[in-house]
Image (cartoon, coloured by chain):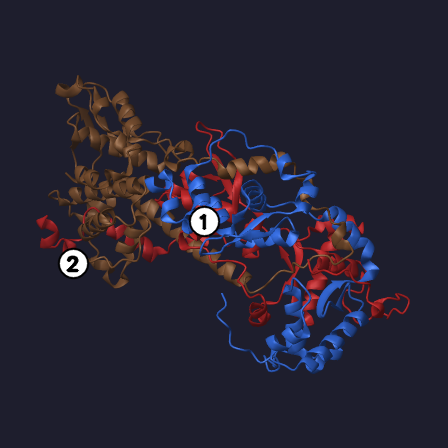
Chain colours: A brown, B red, C blue
Amino acid sequence: MPYEVRTPVFEGPFDLLLHLILRQEVELWEVSLSAIVDGYLAELERLQADASEPLDLETATEFLLIAATLVELKARRLLPGLDDAELDDELLRFEERDLLLARLLECKTFKDAAGALDALIRRADQSVPRRLGPEEPFRSLAPDPLESIAPSALRTAALRMLAAKPVPVVDIDHVAPVRASVRDAVDTVLRLLPASEPMSFRSLVAGVDHRLELVVRFLAILELYKQGMVDLVQFNNFGDLVVRRLQANEAAAALGAYDLDEWDEAPAPMAVRDAEEIRS
Amino acid sequence: MSDAPETPDPEVRDPETRHPETRHPETRHPETRRAIEAVLTAATEPVEPRLLAELLELPVTTIEAVCDELAAAYDDERRGFMLARVAGGYRFQTHPDLAPYVERYVLEGQHSRLSVPALETLAIVAYKQPISRGQVSAIRGVNVEATMTTLLQRGYVEEIGRDPGPGQAVLYGTTTSFLERLGLHSLHDLPPLGDFVPDASVVEALERGLRVSDTPAAATPESLAE
Amino acid sequence: MSDAPETPDPEVRDPETRHPETRHPETRHPETRRAIEAVLTAATEPVEPRLLAELLELPVTTIEAVCDELAAAYDDERRGFMLARVAGGYRFQTHPDLAPYVERYVLEGQHSRLSVPALETLAIVAYKQPISRGQVSAIRGVNVEATMTTLLQRGYVEEIGRDPGPGQAVLYGTTTSFLERLGLHSLHDLPPLGDFVPDASVVEALERGLRVSDTPAAATPESLAE
């Protein structure tokens, strides 16, 4: 089932994923996770190779987050013994999959709401409000708007327009409320995880209620796994994931050297290299 | 400019020669009706009922009742204009039926279209306000910096506060211009968000697409080969 | 915008739903009346009968007859507005009877603030004149066409020259009435911006106009460096 992505321009990972999954309702029963993941990665590579339209950092990060989740899902599906449909429905679900699903649904909801706003705007455009205002002599009675403006306000406005624009990436406003960085999550996981006792993924994310934070904490665990700092065990199919510290590496908590920063604040060229890191 | 002060039209002076007003449904408040018509004719933005009440020294409820009657009467008389309640106030606007003529007159579309990303961002702000840029980005899965800047400059969204939590992110909401642009009286007139929650078939398609254990049929040799 | 809509025939639009309009003297041309009402509602200056005739594809004499009927009807119905013929065109204006209300509204009710985009655009022109629309747009990061038009209409800015370069862009500056309203004697009295350094993008935007007209010899080291 070859999936070629005939692109409209995908603005973000959800656009792309929604498109891949919903592209043809006829194929509903044939939709396969594998094909979706492959299609997603192919499009991601295309986007990254497209030098004319470079992804900004935040968007690239988001694409990669979703890619990581998809790859993880696919990896699980390829493990033997997983095609037991009953288990899929009845046993514990995978948090990251449900998170992704929830985010896709949310995204779709607002896409449709945007369509409704557009319809309202089009309807409103059919009417033009009266704007002529009062005729003379009333017009001259109206206080001139400029009279309420102090010259200093003009100066302030000029400074605002002429001064250096803040660089969006440095603006921490848009990072703070989400409070999720992989680096912090790694620290948190290491703090929570006892040296000798294994701990379930569920306990590691207990009390985390923001979706993105959950995803990020999951990614942090994948990072630790990749670096050989923890081991991941699943006792039952679809059972909870158990995270265990690897003793040999415990001392190597000098993690700082590792460029985790790339998740959070690396400059844009990260894209291709990191995609490979995640998939390796 | 171009506005030569003119003398009052001689033909319409002379309030003495008043006709009896038996023909209008809103005759209960003939002077109120006239005053409202005059003020709305002079207005360049929606006039709040409270302001009309102050100007006319009448209760707001009376103003609203007369405005409702007026709107119905214009509709009934099939006027080319209508009295609309928009963004918290009343205003005269052209009747949508006559858009073909009006469009030809108002040569430049006063509004340029909003792009799809801008509409989606606007929808999120409208339904989730107060909301920070970061939260909008999280929902859309893309950086919304540029889009938000456009919406701010167009005056559809504005800062309405700060997140009390750490980081003190700026929180945004929609403006009166937003309501005017959509022709809505208030945010309560937005269609409920629940109307847009994807229906079962979409949810099922998404769920199936991300199902960890595929139905056996879908596990093709190709997909296993990797 | 501007995709010309096909001409609806003013006279034949849904006669089914038409109300018996026995009360209006202008029943001979109900759709013409509606279209005129709509165009005059949307108008921002008096509309010449000739223009109305073009829009409605009717003879000027018909337009004038219907407008006369309309004006008489409004008078007869004792509307708060009237259809007046001024400065060679028709417009809606307030009825002189209601002057006290209109006056109070204009004095007290109207929010005559300068919008933020208008203030920002004005500030750029004030401090960086002479400046072209394109340069202002580049600094503000949005198209400033509409805002500049407002400022021109209000008489705050005016054309003060042309860029000598190939584009011959119109250059704008502030007016004396701008200074008067701010209570300033001359531009020198504007509060100085101080020793702040403009952003590189601003410098670039301001240089762009000049650079186009520059001969290669005039290129400065800075502009070559880019």
Give x and y (percent) for residue A10. 31, 52
Asked if residue A150 can be seen in this view, the reply is yes
Picture layout, residue A256 above or below residue C121: above
Judge depth for marks 1 and 2 and give the one in front: 1
Picture layout, residue C203 above or below residue A257: below
Q: Which residue is mark 1?
A: C209
The chain identifier of the residue carrying mark 1 reads C
Picture layout, residue A170 above or below residue C161: above
Label placed on residue C4: none
Q: Which residue is mark 2?
A: A2
Residue at image coords 22%, 56%: A31
Say what secondary structure mark 2 lies in: loop
Say what secondary structure mark 1 lies in: helix
What kind of residue is marked 2? Pro
CA distance for labels 1 and 2: 52 Å
Q: Quadrant of residue A127?
A: bottom right
Q: Is residue B128 left or right of residue A150?
A: left
Q: Is residue A237 left or right of residue B57?
A: left
**Crowd class of label 1 (few under 14; some 14 to 19; many from 20; radius 10 Å):** many
Residue at image coords 27%, 30%: A261
The chain identifier of the residue carrying mark 2 reads A
Seen from the viewer's position, the closer of residues C175 and A153 is C175
| Quadrant of the frame with the N terminus of chain B | bottom right
What kind of residue is marked 1? Gly
Residue at image coords 17%, 40%: A276
